Amino acid sequence: MVRLYHRTVIQKLLGILRFGACKIVHRRISGPWSSSVDTRCSIILGSPHATMEIGARCLVSSDCTLFSNGTLSLGRECFFNSHARIIAHHQITIGTNCLFGPYATVIDHDHRVDFFGGRMDRNELVTAPISIENNVWIGEKATILKGVSIGENSVIGAGSVVTKSIPANCVAVGSPAKVIRRLLDRIDSTCESDRPS
């Protein structure tokens, strides 16, 4: 038991050092030294104007990808499980205390597809900002697409594809994701599933 504890502390310290090295190499990555980046993570700034802000005590697990070609802002105490991908070509803002399951994906763009002379042209990106508020839990293999806002205290079920905004204090599942219930027992809830037909 003692050996496991010491190994965990050492891994945490190495993660903090990895994040510090990222901040030194990429001056446009900002955040306190208390955040930790696990092994084999990709933290990428795709252009000279791209920025990334990582909040205090964030933990980015192994094999995650954080990519910014625009603005990426992560709040305090967020946890990204293994293989999570956050890809910002325009703007992604994530609040405090958010959890991302394994293979969760957040992407603020897609490709415009046109045909010219019988050939497919898919080089142009269409972007829209994403906002994920505080205390949101994104389940395993869930995908959040461009232009979406997710309200605070909401849960997105595993394997869901979120194409439209989700209100606060709700559980949403499916492809496309739909609100199935509210989390807090309040009369003023904005969940559509609780409104009379």
Image: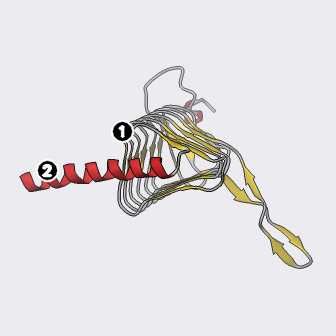
* Callout 2 crowding tier (Cα within 10 Å): few <14, some 14–19, many ≥20: few
Say whether residue 12 is left or right of residue 52.
left
Badge 2 marks a residue whose secondary structure is: helix
- Tell me which residue sits at (14%, 51%) in the image: 6
- Residue 137: image location, x then y, percent: 43, 43
Q: Real-space Cα distance between discs 1 and 2?
A: 19 Å
Q: Give the residue displayed 64% in from the left and 49% down from the top.
A: 163
Q: Residue 14, image x and y in percent? A: 29, 53
In the rendered image, the residue lying farthest to the left is 2
Tell me if residue 81 comes above or below residue 182 in the rendering.
below
**Quadrant location of the C terminus in the rendered image:** top right
Callout 1: few (<14), some (14-19), or many (20+) C-alpha neighbours within 10 Å? some
- 1 and 2 marks in contact (CB < 8 Å): no
- Coordinates of residue 110 in the picture (x, y in percent): 70, 58
Report the residue at 54% width, 34% height from top.
151
Viewer-side residue, 153 vs 13: 13
Where is mark 2, residue-wise?
Answer: 5
**Outermost residue to the right:** 117
* Residue assigned mark 1: 57
In terms of sequence position, does the residue under pointer 1 or pointer 2 come before the other? 2
Above or below, 153 against 173 in this view is above
Q: Callout 1: helix, strand or loop?
A: loop
Q: Position of residue 166 (x, y in %)?
A: 58, 39
The residue nearer to you, when weighing 12 against 159, is 12
* Kind of residue sitting beneath label 2: Tyr
* Residue 157 visible (yes or no): no
